[in-house]
Image (cartoon, rainbow, N blue to C red):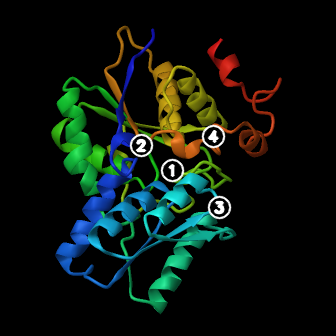
């Protein structure tokens, strides 16, 4: 039986992604505590979307902002941050154990020991998940009060943590399903190379309570690309995180047959414009995923939809 999947499209936020919520909440909390004050510089590690969101907020509030990212960050995202006045530092070599994220965190720590930087630390900052506890989860229930299943991607796990905690307290009957990329350690799997920014992590999350999740699904990045392109062929240009969440949702539906359609929602973190040089670029995909779309390799979007 086919199952409809509603998407909460966070890409329409002014910062272009769901990260605008966490960025606003973390900056506000730092100001309220007195940790962030005029003249102090903000620094954060980001694969892209939070960096853009913080660039917007820092520019609007008169703060200097440094984003530490890595070579997976899309060129358009990097250019956007710089256009907004942010300093962007790009890590090229991964830490042998903790990957590119570990190397980024090392650079953040180094900056904080040499200058007057405030690291917001999205990976452990409670304001990250609180933003989604206060906004994302109740917004979803307001639109879909009969919700049965909620699919949320796992990056820093802020969105997943906030939504799962809210549902556990207010709607424990809702199944929250975490969706992650193969190669991420968020759900305890081995760390493997990943090329699409957004979901996944090379460092175990500190804020996620996995006991609040009904299920966990992991998606191969090549299938993320396939799903993004399949959605685009129908007129929906989404980012890699959304492709992963939708692919994970379809896999979950297949594993959980029902006599009637599930009432389900997936969180779509951003739109696809920032991925035109990666997920939607044939040369990039061929280099990142050898055999994609070839006989015996990962199925192309056309083959998958046939």
| Disc number placed over residue 198 in the picture, else none | 1
Spatial CA distance of label 1 from label 4 is 12 Å
The tag earlier along the polypeptide, 2 or 1, is 1
Percent across and percent down for residue 284 are 72, 44
Q: Nearer the viewer, mark 1 or mark 3?
A: 3
* Label 4 element class: loop
| Residue pointed to by mark 4 | 279
Q: Are marks 2 and 1 in contact (CB under 8 Å)?
A: yes
Residue at point 19%, 26% (across, down): 145
Spatial CA distance of label 2 from label 1 is 9 Å
| Disc number placed over residue 269 in the picture, else none | 2
Residue 74 in view (yes/no): no
Spatial CA distance of label 3 from label 2 is 21 Å
The tag earlier along the polypeptide, 3 or 2, is 3
* Label 1 element class: loop
Spatial CA distance of label 1 from label 3 is 13 Å
The tag earlier along the polypeptide, 1 or 4, is 1
Q: Are marks 1 and 4 in contact (CB under 8 Å)?
A: no
Spatial CA distance of label 3 from label 4 is 15 Å
């Amino acid at each position: 039986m086919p199952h409809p999947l509603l998407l909460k499209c966070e890409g329409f936020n002014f910062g272009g992604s769901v990260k605008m919520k966490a960025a606003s909440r973390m900056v506000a909390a730092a100001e309220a505590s007195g940790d962030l004050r005029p003249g102090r510089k903000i620094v954060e590690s980001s694969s892209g979307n939070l960096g853009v969101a913080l660039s917007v907020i820092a520019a609007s509030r008169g703060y200097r902002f440094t984003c530490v990212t890595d070579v997976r960050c899309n060129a358009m995202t990097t250019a956007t941050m710089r256009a907004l006045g942010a300093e962007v530092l790009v890590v090229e070599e991964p830490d042998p154990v903790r990957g590119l994220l570990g190397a980024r965190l090392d650079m953040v720590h180094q900056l904080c020991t040499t200058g007057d930087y405030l690291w917001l630390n999205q990976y452990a900052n409670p304001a990250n998940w609180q933003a989604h506890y206060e906004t994302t989860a109740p917004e979803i229930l307001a639109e879909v009060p009969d919700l049965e299943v909620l699919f949320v991607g796992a990056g820093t796990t802020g969105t997943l943590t906030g939504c799962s905690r809210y549902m556990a307290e207010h709607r424990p009957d809702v199944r929250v399903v975490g969706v992650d990329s193969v190669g991420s350690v968020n759900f305890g799997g081995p760390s493997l190379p990943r090329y699409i920014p957004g979901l996944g992590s090379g460092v175990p999350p500190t804020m996620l309570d996995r006991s609040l999740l009904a299920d966990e699904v992991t998606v191969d990045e090549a299938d993320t690309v396939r799903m993004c392109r399949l959605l685009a062929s129908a007129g929906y240009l989404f980012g890699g995180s959304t492709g992963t969440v939708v692919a994970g949702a379809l896999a979950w539906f297949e594993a959980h047959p029902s006599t009637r359609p599930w009432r389900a929602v997936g969180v779509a973190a951003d739109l696809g414009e920032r991925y035109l040089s990666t997920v939607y670029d044939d040369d990039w995909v061929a280099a990142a995923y050898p055999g994609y779309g070839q006989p015996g390799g990962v199925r192309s979007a056309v083959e998958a939809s046939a």
